Image (cartoon, rainbow, N blue to C red):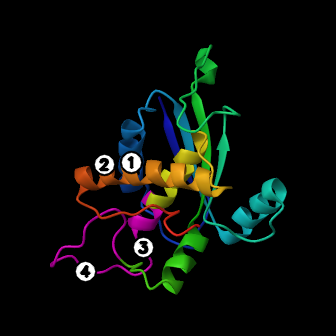
């Protein structure tokens, strides 16, 4: 139904319209476009506060997901009884943390968000490359649908789902995205 993207951080410039387009594609791939979804972009301080409060880990992180429907089995779509229940939940993206991780891993951060760089398009400093945001958003969406990675078996199941949806996204957008949990175990 609705997709709300809020950018509550000012550390890393973010282009919401291209990000919205990619998340809408992910929703369609997952067949959850009939559900409301919130994507909130925050800085390290805010993601760390949430991580400390809800996971008892007092460090920043890349993504936190807060499902509206609890106790879903992996891959199970919610079965709402009322209109108000057509909600997947919220995904918080730690944009500053993602940016820092990309720097540490030698990723290219200066590409324009969600656009393939073409020869005549200059690099724009400060724009977080969409690759990591799209992959992290896909990871968060999987969590909203009951996928976890606490055990190796759960990780394998989540990895396969992330791989499948990112391969479909790659086919649509021409990107070459890999799952966030690729080397988790």
Q: Mark 4 points at which residue?
A: 122
- The local secondary structure at tag 2 comes to helix
Badge nearest the viewer, 1 or 4: 1
Determine the CA span between mark 1 and mark 3: 25 Å
For marks 3 and 4, the one nearer the N-term is 4
Q: Is residue 74 left or right of residue 150?
A: left
As drawn, 135 above or below 111 = above
Instruction: Look at the image and say whether residue 120 sits in the magenta stretch.
Output: yes
**Residue that badge 2 annotates:** 168
Alpha carbon distance from label 1 to label 4: 30 Å
Pick whichever of labels 1 and 3 is earlier in the sequence: 3
Packing grade of label 2 (10 A; few <14, some 14-19, many >=20) is some
Disc sitting over residue 68 in the figure: none
Give the position of the C terminus as an image quadrant: bottom right
Residue under pointer 1: 165
Q: Distance between the residues labelled 1 and 2?
A: 5 Å
């Amino acid at each position: 139904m609705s997709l709300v993207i809020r950018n509550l951080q000012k550390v890393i410039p973010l282009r919401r319209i291209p990000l919205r387009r990619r998340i809408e594609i992910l929703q369609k791939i997952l067949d959850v476009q009939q559900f409301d979804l919130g994507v909130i972009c925050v800085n390290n301080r805010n993601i760390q506060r949430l991580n400390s409060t809800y996971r008892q880990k007092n460090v920043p992180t890349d993504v936190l997901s807060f499902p509206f429907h609890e106790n879903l089995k992996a891959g199970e779509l919610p079965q709402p009884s009322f209109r108000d229940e057509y909600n997947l939940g919220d995904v918080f993206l730690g944009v500053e943390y993602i940016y820092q991780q990309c720097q540490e891993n030698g990723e290219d951060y200066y590409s324009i968000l969600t656009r393939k760089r073409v020869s005549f398009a200059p690099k724009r400093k400060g724009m977080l490359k969409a690759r990591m945001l799209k992959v992290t958003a896909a990871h968060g969406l999987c969590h909203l649908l009951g996928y976890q990675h606490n055990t190796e078996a759960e990780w394998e199941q989540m990895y396969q789902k992330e791989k499948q949806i990112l391969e479909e996204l790659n086919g649509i957008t021409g990107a070459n995205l890999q799952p966030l949990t690729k080397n988790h175990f």
